[in-house]
Image: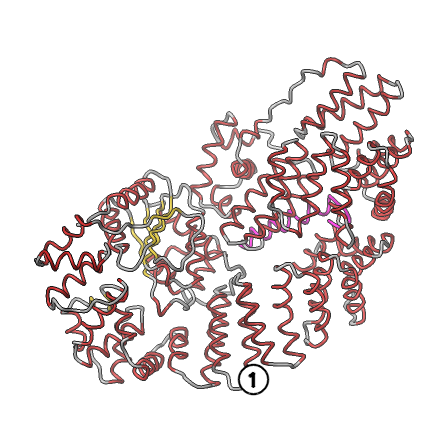
Amino acid sequence: MLYGRSTELAALDELTAGAREGRSGALVLRGEAGIGKTALLDRTAQSASASGMRVLRVTGVEPEADLAFGGLVQLLWPVQDRLDGLPEPQADALRAVLGATRPPTRDRFLTGLAVLTLLADLAEQGPLLCLVDDAQWLDQATSDALLFAARRLAAEQVAMVFATRDEGFAAPGLTELRPSRLDTGDAVSLLADLGLPPALRDQVIAESAGNPLALIEFGAARRDDPGSFTPVTVADRVLSSYRTQIAALPEKTRLALLFAAAEGRGDLPLQMKAARTLGVGLEDLEDAERAGLIQVTESTVVFRHPLIGTAAYQGAVLARRIAVHQALADAADDPDCRARHLPLATTSPDDEVASELVAAAERAADRSAYAAASLLHQQAARLTPDRRAQVRRLTDAATCALNAGHAGQARDLAEQAERSSPEPEDLARLAPVRAAVMFESGERREAARLLLRTHAAGPGLGPAMLRTGATYGWFAGDADSVREAAERLASLGEADPMVEGMAHLVDDDYARGLPLLERAVAAGQDGSDAARTRALHSAILLGDDAAAMELAAAEVARCRAQGLIGALPQALHLLAERQVLAGAHRDAEASVAEAVEIARDTGLRERVAWLGGVPARIAAIEGDERRCRDLVRDVPDVGRVAGESALSLLELARGDYEAALGRLETAAGPGPQRHMAMAMATVADQVEAAVRLGQSGRAERPMRAFEAWARAGRQPWALAVAHRCRALVDGREEDYREAVRLHGQGRRPFERARTALLYGEWLRRARRRSEARDTLRSALEDFEGLRAVPWAERARAELRAAGDATTSAKATAENVLDRLTPQELQVVRLAADGNSSREIAAQLFLSRRTVEHHLYKAYPKLGVGSRRELARLNLV
């Protein structure tokens, strides 16, 4: 019987009922030790089992908090036979977790996707409940995997419940429920069976502060010893009560409990194998079992409550704990289990032990458990007698911490290593970690300078450090860093056309810089992953829309195929920017929506904010001022050009030319960022705003730079915009005509429509009204297709002035695709291309049921009833 838990039980029942009806969900039970979280899980498990749900359960164990995937192994061990049904990269990731020999896992989030797919597959046979107790003691790799799965649950018939203490296990995005303390009436009911006198009962209730475990333990203690202790806090009181019970046991029983607490996983055979070396046997557990402190089965030992294990461990003297950990390490067949106990059994430097820990760290890193790998490298460093080797291990620890997403910890470890060694080679190995942390913290110029300063001392690291330094310098607006990186790469015989091209761009030498970027694009088409990445960024700098779109789409496809979840948000971001330029706003919104969801699920908060620049530009084009300003507000400094260009476009559309021009002049500023393709595209806005203000001289310098850039790059859209800008300033019709002709070869419909609008205005003022109407109708058609409301209104106003009254009430035709959510749009397009639900799920990192859920919601919106009918629709 659970007292005072009606609210909590109702929430848990609703969660499991939803799973049985096909609505997945996750819930976090958060509260202090003893508040009743485990009892709620037990009751939920019983109720779910009685209703036919399958139940998987795992309990975090404090000694295993740093053991890579220890919790996930416990959860998935009973269902490992189902791995063969997963997509191969996901199956490989889980086989690596479970100990099979497999290639290293390349992405730390792939395991979470594999868990989601496996749980969804299990739920195909019936609803599934996953219960996680003491989640605050899960290793981070397990936590990351389970939380990734929990956040992406939708229609899989899966319910997940995490029980955790107040501290630890941050789970943003999941619903939390805090079990309340028991009121006096429920406390009296709970104590009724103990037969305490009313005065003593009331004292126990006061001391327990409504904590159910404290009520039970204090009540039993006071019944047996009415004058027992009164420590300060509830937690201390409970621990003290357990210590008192343990202290009354025979010495060998206390030692057997210490083995159970130190081992942590409840592995009875391992505990007994180790305990025999200290003269302890199975019979020594009997008194503890009779006292109700533990439960013993043929293969496991489980403490009735985790605090009992804590009391058994903390109550032992240090020498005993060291001896027990050494015995467990010697008895372990699993090298990772041995590595967990060795640091706790070693009090002085020991290179042999340190080497074992390094090997364990490398195994953890191969499975993408970078947090565990970082800790193992730290432990190895502590036990390493040689100072240089110690620094190397601290460097490896910092690298793993950075890969785990712990930038602050990576900085601390790198600084610790730096203090320990003045050797140039050691500092060079540290530099990439320190620079990455500095760059993410906003110290971009300093990050570039650090890499350039130390690259020569790192054997084999120099070219990579110089390339990264050039990139950091570019984003920092540090032209000197870009030039220096290019020069040093050339001196090493490692000349990089992208870096060399960037170096010429910062000197405004487009004629030399852009052909080098063209070489980088060509070299990356069939090159390595790194070469393709450089090719993509080179294509963006060139303004080569066709190559950039192709390379961005290929990068997204590669991330999907290889399960590179952590890299996918950036790839989708780059693709979405290209889609906006191509006028595919709904596609861009779908790409951004997926990127935002994955970035949130994987803790990439900076990326979530940066992504806002894409929908902000769409909102600006479409005239949605409130949405545009809300989105720009959160864009970080590194995305300032995108944010400011969106706001200036909004102001330009509504005729606030002074505000638009001032904003763009401020945003451009000095430094290489002004040469980026998106920044270059804003030059046209500067020119138009300046001309409208009658101050074309304010835009002359950026316009000349843009013209030089366009001529050197030879991209039709850029040349067209350059001619439009010159036409605005000089008023020559031949520039307008050439701009219109070049737009026919380009891929930017918004720019094409703006050119047609401005040319139409010019023709109308030249009293060539018939020609003006034809040109303005072309602009209006493009604007309406883009839902660019303020620009379409301008085109209609010009048409009316040109004598075309039929357009005044024209409404934008509805596109049926606008009825779909971004994710529904992605799903229906993949389905229309003939992909199965399982194939779509693998590409979008969803479950099959969620894919089908989106399809069934999309069908009526599109007026179809099957995949066959879907394939007949025009979904462009």
**Is residue 194 toward the left or the right of residue 377 in the image?**
left
Question: Residue placed at 47% from the left, 68% from the top?
Answer: 364
**Is residue 317 toward the left or the right of residue 766 in the image?**
left
Question: Residue placed at 46% from the left, 68% from the top?
Answer: 372
Coloring scheme of the render?
A: secondary structure
Q: Is residue 842 above or below residue 317?
A: above
**Is residue 584 toward the left or the right of residue 257 in the image?**
right
Q: Where on the picture, by quarter, is residue 395?
A: bottom right
Give percent across and percent down for residue 77.
34, 61
Residue 300 seen in the figure: no
Disc 1 crowd, CA 10 A, few/some/many (<14, 14-19, 20+)? few
Q: Where on the picture, by quarter, is residue 314?
A: bottom left
- Tell how many labels: 1
Label 1 is placed on what type of residue? Arg
Q: Quadrant of the C terminus?
A: top right
Q: Where on the picture, by quarter, is residue 325?
A: bottom left
Which residues are the magenta region?
540-565
Q: Is residue 125 above or below residue 744?
A: below
Give percent across and percent down for residue 514.
82, 52
Give percent across and percent down for residue 209.
24, 56
- The residue nearer to you, when weighing 573 against 658, is 658
- The residue nearer to you, when weighing 583 against 393, is 393
Reading the image, the residue beneath label 1 is 387
Give percent across and percent down for residue 599.
54, 50
Q: Is residue 416 above or below residue 203?
A: below
Question: Residue placed at 69% from the left, 68% from the top?
Answer: 465
Secondary structure category for the residue under label 1: helix
Our reading of the magenta stretch's main secondary structure is helix
Q: Is residue 759 above or below residue 646?
A: above
